[in-house]
């Protein structure tokens, strides 16, 4: 393997050629999405250099949005593609080495959807394989030994609808859409067009494999933090290696696609509950459990109305909030009534950590007993003594 780094101009030319090939056959939703996929394809050729293996999620709301065609083009230009459709978990596990293939999964909704029983091992592999040094152990009956199998590999998944949070939280997400009138692409023919795309893959491989040591030591400045930075760092490192306008384009893609993902991320039920509890408390320092439930279910279109056969119950409410260290307790109100209740102050830490967009949580809230007039207590307890 050639270990002499190639001139930077080679990288610019190869990335430009990869992007041109990509947009020849696929209408990408945005220029930033095209840049991101280009860099992801390139990053697959340098997997031994990365600490994290970003997923590429290609999702669409309906059929005929170009997701499978995009996966075809990715397959033609990525490093050592391994199609996982109908592959057994054992075959996938044993195909991953220190220089792993690129896993490609079309119709990924069949693996993660409600009728996807039997794919637990594949799901586990895709979750664990994002980070290096997360192997799995399997017992080999033939040798009567425990085998340690690597899971680290970049993976592209195409399907209809969202993937599980555990996947999308580790992914570059591309939201495809149907072509509009006037949007045209060249027809893709596997036998005719794949050889030319594969030639581009060969060029990418030669360029990046000659720079593995540089890439492994690379610590590019990232415009995002935490897991998003882990996911996007290989793509930005490739752009930095190439130079030209690619570093700026890479960071613009990071900001555009992570902002889009944030706007479109469905909140977990627990976070939704925290937000709705914030609204339910208004100016009350404490609320009986029954009153809090009534307020949560006052909106007939709210999740809590249909949260189970009877809607959200006190037991389910307690189970959801317990994860944040929030528990109900016996609260005695100034008129002597004692009922199970939640105190607003107990939510403050969770609101600050998980719902930072909310306004200051206790600002202007009275804490003395004056708020609890007998009339108020009778109102919030339904007249309970």
Image (cartoon, rainbow, N blue to C red):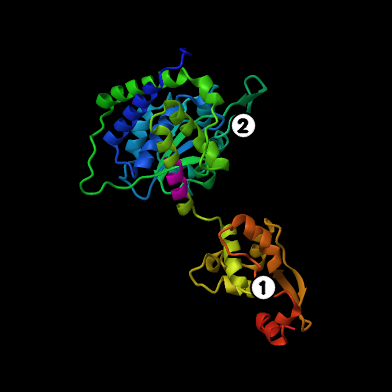
Are there few (<14), some (14-19), or many (20+) residues within 10 Å of tag 2?
A: some
Q: Is 60 placed left or right of 368 in the picture?
A: left
Please state the extent of the stretch shown in magenta in the rendering: 253-261
Q: Is residue 87 something that shows in the picture?
A: yes
Are there few (<14), some (14-19), or many (20+) residues within 10 Å of tag 1?
A: few
The answer to whether marks 1 and 2 mark residues whose Cβ atoms lie closer than 8 Å is: no
Pick out the residue farthest to the bottom: 375
- Indicate the quadrant where residue 94 lies: top right
Element at label 2: loop
Q: Is 224 placed left or right of 104 in the picture?
A: right
Residue 2 in the image: state x and y as whole percent.
Answer: 46, 12
Q: Name the residue under label 2.
A: 134
Residue 7 in the image: state x and y as whole percent.
Answer: 40, 18
Dominant SS of magenta comes to helix
Q: Magenta segment: does it hold 52?
A: no
Question: Does residue 235 sit above or below 379 in this rendering?
Answer: above
Residue 63 in the image: state x and y as whole percent.
Answer: 33, 47
Q: Which residue is drawn at 75% across and 77% down?
A: 368
**Which label's residue is closer to the chain start, 1 or 2?**
2
* Structural distance between the alpha carbons of marks 1 and 2: 48 Å
Q: Is residue 319 something that shows in the picture?
A: no
Q: Magenta segment: does it hold 256?
A: yes
Residue 152 in the image: state x and y as whole percent.
Answer: 55, 29
Question: Does residue 369 sit above or below 262 in this rendering?
Answer: below
What is the number of the mark on residue 365? 1
Question: Does residue 116 sit above or below 375 in this rendering?
Answer: above
Q: Which residue is drawn at 59% across and 30% down?
A: 132
């Amino acid at each position: 393997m050639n270990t002499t780094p190639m001139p930077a101009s080679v990288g610019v030319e190869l990335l430009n050629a990869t992007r041109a090939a990509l947009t020849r056959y696929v209408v990408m939703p945005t220029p930033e999405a095209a840049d991101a996929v280009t860099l992801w394809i390139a990053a697959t050729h340098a997997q031994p250099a990365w600490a994290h293996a970003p997923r590429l999620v290609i999702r669409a709301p309906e059929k005929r949005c170009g997701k499978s065609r995009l996966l075809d083009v990715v397959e033609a230009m990525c490093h050592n593609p391994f199609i996982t459709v109908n592959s057994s978990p054992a075959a996938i596990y044993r195909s991953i080495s220190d220089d792993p293939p690129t896993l490609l999964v079309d119709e990924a909704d069949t693996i993660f959807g409600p009728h996807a029983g039997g794919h637990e091992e594949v799901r586990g592999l895709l979750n664990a394989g994002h980070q290096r040094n997360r192997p799995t152990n399997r017992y080999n009956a033939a040798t009567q030994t425990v085998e340690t199998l690597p899971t680290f590999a970049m993976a592209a998944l195409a399907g209809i609808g969202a993937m599980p949070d555990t996947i999308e939280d580790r992914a570059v997400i591309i939201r495809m859409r149907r072509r509009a009138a006037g949007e045209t692409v060249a027809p893709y023919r596997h036998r005719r067009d794949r050889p030319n795309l594969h030639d581009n893959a060969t060029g990418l491989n030669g360029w990046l494999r000659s720079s593995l040591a540089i890439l492994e030591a690379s610590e590019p400045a990232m415009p995002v933090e935490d897991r998003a930075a882990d996911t996007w760092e290989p793509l930005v490192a490739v752009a930095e290696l190439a130079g030209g306008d690619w570093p700026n384009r890479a960071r613009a893609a990071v900001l555009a696609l992570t902002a889009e993902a944030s706007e479109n991320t469905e909140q977990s039920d627990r976070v939704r509950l925290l937000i709705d509890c914030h609204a339910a408390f208004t100016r009350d320092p404490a609320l009986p459990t029954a009153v809090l439930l009534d307020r949560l279910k006052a909106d007939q279109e709210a999740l809590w109305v249909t949260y189970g056969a009877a809607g959200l119950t006190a037991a389910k409410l307690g189970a959801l909030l317990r994860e944040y260290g929030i528990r109900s307790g016996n609260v005695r109100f100034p008129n002597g009534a004692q009922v199970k209740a939640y105190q607003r102050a107990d939510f403050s830490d969770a609101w600050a950590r998980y719902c930072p967009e909310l306004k200051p949580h206790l600002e202007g809230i009275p804490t003395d007993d004056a708020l609890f007039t007998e009339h108020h207590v009778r109102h919030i307890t339904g007249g309970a003594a």
